[in-house]
């Protein structure tokens, strides 16, 4: 896991709690917009992709300040701070980590971001609006990962399959208390093949899908990460682009809703749990690729990390995680129903060929 960039003045305008709070509402209204027409963009082509300079983005989104700090560029308004770093595929919006599909490019001393990332990620965060054709859901399909003979990640104190199922039951009760209908892909220690999980989601009307997992890698890996399906023509996060990535999946019809739901849930989990932020990421997991409903996969922490594994083993932590996910789902739905145009993304005080939108007048 790469270290997060540090800026000495990160808390100058927004504390971590305040910034995260700002992100919770707008995350719910992400939009893949038609490309930014009516503006004189200075597009540059690199490796067959369009890139857009930071100066254009400052002007289009009317950021009062754009500052170059070494390898970094920082956009700042009274409610939002966005940071890019040359050559990396991580950006921070109010100090919440988002993983780009293509690295930030530097050319002749200027930083550029791909048009794909502007359309599929940055614009929806900065200029949230109603998602066209969004599912106004009253049902949540909960998918506790693994089960039966498939233990998933195994830590010193327990197995992922058990933690995931327990978290799902806790989340079920919290969502039901808010009036949601709940469908579980499994409600006992049995193995359900991934195609069956997808089928359960696809036959459930007016629903979103949340797959619950815990992570394992090595003893030092730590933190929370949330996945949405990778858009067509982009690689999975931290992977090289391959030919099969150019093929659309059924779930790509819900790209805007997927990233909106992922951002709302991830931001609320950071706000409530103060977890290490591993980012909102993209992947073509089977349970995401085939689902025709808004769908995300949450990795709630590392059972392989002694400290985090001990925390995950405690029922109190799993209850807090369930509460945070529940709040993120509720924030997403409330914003869809309200038709708000919130201007903010929650902030952390310590930074750890697609069309695009029309400029609003």
Image (cartoon, grey):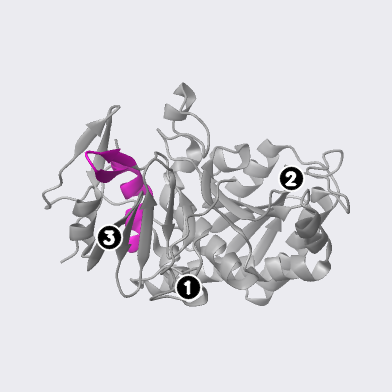
Residue 292 seen in the figure: no
Residue at 12% in and 52% down: 39
Q: Earlier in the sequence, mark 2 or mark 3?
A: 3
Q: Residue at x 24, y 53 (%)?
A: 357
Question: Is residue 231 something that shows in the picture?
Answer: yes
Total numbered labels placed on residues in the image: 3
The image position of residue 74, as x and y in percent, is: 33, 59
Residue 200 in percent (x, y) is at 66, 47
Q: Secondary structure at mark 3?
A: strand
Rate crowding at label 2 as few (under 14), some (14 to 19) or many (20 or more) other CA atoms within 10 Å. Answer: some
Judge by depth and name the residue closer to the eye, 322 or 338: 322
Q: Secondary structure at mark 2?
A: loop
Answer with left or right where residue 212 lies relative to residue 259: right
| 21, above or below 304, in the image | below
Q: Nearer the viewer, residue 161 or 117?
A: 117
Residue tagged 1: 334
177 relative to 254 in the view: left or right: right
Q: Which mark is residue 216?
A: 2
Quadrant in the rendering for residue 45? top left
| Mark toward the viewer: 3 or 1 | 3
From mark 2 to mark 1, how far is it between C-alphas? 34 Å
Q: Is residue 153 above or below residue 57?
A: above
Tag 3 residue: 67
In this picture, is 98 found above or below 50? below
Q: Position of residue 140 (x, y in %)?
A: 62, 60
Which one is earlier in the sequence, the residue at label 3 or at label 1? 3
Residue 296 picture location, percent across and down: 57, 51
């Amino acid at each position: 896991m790469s270290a997060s960039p540090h800026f000495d003045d990160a808390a100058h305008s927004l504390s971590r709690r305040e910034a995260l709070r700002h992100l919770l509402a707008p995350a719910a209204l992400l939009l893949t917009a038609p490309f930014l027409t009516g503006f004189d963009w200075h597009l540059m082509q690199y490796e067959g992709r369009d890139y857009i300079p930071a100066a254009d983005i400052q002007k289009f989104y009317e950021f009062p300040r754009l500052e170059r700090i070494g390898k970094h560029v920082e956009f700042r308004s009274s409610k939002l701070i966005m940071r890019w770093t040359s050559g990396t595929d991580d950006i921070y919006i109010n100090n919440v980590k988002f993983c780009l599909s293509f690295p930030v490019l530097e050319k002749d001393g200027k930083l550029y971001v791909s048009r794909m990332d502007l359309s599929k990620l940055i614009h929806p965060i900065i200029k949230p609006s109603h998602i066209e054709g969004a599912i106004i859901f009253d049902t949540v399909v909960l998918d506790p990962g693994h089960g039966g003979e498939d233990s998933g990640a195994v830590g010193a104190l327990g197995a992922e399959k058990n933690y995931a199922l327990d978290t799902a039951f806790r989340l079920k009760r919290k969502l039901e208390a808010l009036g949601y209908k709940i469908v579980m892909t499994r409600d006992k220690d049995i193995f359900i093949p991934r195609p069956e999980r997808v089928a359960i989601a696809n036959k459930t009307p007016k629903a979103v899908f949340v797959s619950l997992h815990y992570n394992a890698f090595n003893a030092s890996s730590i933190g929370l990460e949330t996945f949405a399906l990778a858009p067509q023509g982009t690689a999975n996060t931290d992977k090289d682009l391959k030919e099969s990535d150019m093929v659309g999946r059924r779930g790509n019809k819900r790209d805007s809703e997927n990233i909106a739901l992922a951002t709302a849930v991830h931001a609320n989990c950071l706000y409530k749990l103060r977890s290490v932020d591993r980012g909102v990421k993209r992947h073509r997991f089977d349970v995401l690729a085939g689902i025709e409903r808004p769908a995300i996969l949450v990795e709630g922490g590392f059972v392989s990390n002694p400290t985090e594994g001990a925390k995950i083993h405690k029922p109190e932590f799993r209850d807090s995680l369930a509460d945070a996910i529940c709040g993120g789902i509720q924030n997403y739905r409330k914003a869809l129903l309200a038709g708000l145009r919130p201007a903010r993304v929650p902030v952390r005080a310590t930074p750890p060929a697609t069309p695009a939108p029309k400029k609003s007048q």
